[in-house]
Amino acid sequence: MLEMPKRIWIELHTDTAVPDSCDVIVETDSGKLYTALFVTFPYLQRQMDLTYAVSKQLPDTPPVRYAVLETPHILVENLERDTIEDTIDNLLALDVFEGLFTLVTEDEETAARTPDLGKRATTEVAAVVLSEVLVVEG
């Protein structure tokens, strides 16, 4: 069954001159919470520049630019509300939403990747993000 978003919270990361990433939490009609990180191309460039700077300082490591993306990242052209909401709609329509967003659970033991449910996080993680997000009405 396709679940529809009930609410979307967006927290811009303002640690750069121009915000290039944001945490997004989606609450569905059934009450489930999902989270993902939306990023832009400048975010990837910044990550690559950071790894280059670190590798220059470490002995026996060649300086190289790369980015390692460990958590779900969704690359978008910009972080405008409409872009994020339209992307979520597309991911739902393509039936890939649950594989790209992290399901938030109450159970620490189930906060692991499973083939049919995707990656999970605990409610403590979501509570921290929710306490600092900008509510987007839509």
Image (cartoon, helix red, strand yellow):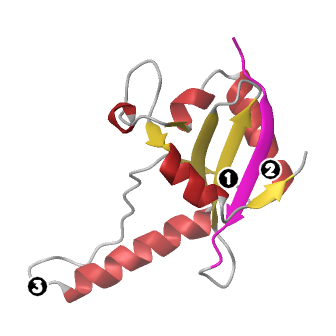
Relative image position of residue 128 (x, y in whole percent): 56, 59
Mark 2 is on which residue type?
Answer: Thr
Residue 96: name its quadrant.
top right
Residue drawn at (56%, 68%), measured in percent from left and top? 43
Residue drawn at (51%, 65%), measured in percent from left and top? 44
Separation of residues labelled 2 and 3 (CA atoms): 42 Å
In the image, 88 versus 137, the foreground residue is 137
Instruction: Determine the residue located farthest toward the left in the rendered image.
Output: 60
In the image, 109 versus 46, the foreground residue is 109
Residue drawn at (81%, 40%), measured in percent from left and top? 86
Q: Which residue is mark 2?
A: 83
Residue drawn at (37%, 25%), measured in percent from left and top? 114
In which quadrant is the N terminus drawn? Answer: top right
Mark 2 or 3: in front is 2
In the image, 22 versus 108, the foreground residue is 108
Instruction: Determine the residue located farthest toward the bottom in the rendered image.
Output: 57
Q: Residues within 10 Å of mark 2 (few under 14, many from 20)?
A: few
Quick one: label 1 or label 2, which is nearer the N terminus?
1
Relative image position of residue 64 (x, y in whole percent): 29, 73
Q: Does the magenta segment cover residue 7?
A: yes
SS state under label 1: loop
Query: As displayed, is residue 109 above or below residue 20?
Result: above
Q: Are marks 1 and 2 in contact (CB under 8 Å)?
A: yes
Q: Does the magenta segment cover residue 126?
A: no
Q: Which residue is mark 3?
A: 59
Q: Which residue is mark 1?
A: 76
Q: Residues within 10 Å of mark 1 (few under 14, many from 20)?
A: some
Instruction: Determine the residue located farthest toward the top in the rendered image.
Output: 1
Q: Which residues are magenta?
A: 1-14
Quick one: label 3 or label 1, which is nearer the N terminus?
3
SS state under label 3: loop
Mark 1 is on which residue type?
Answer: Val
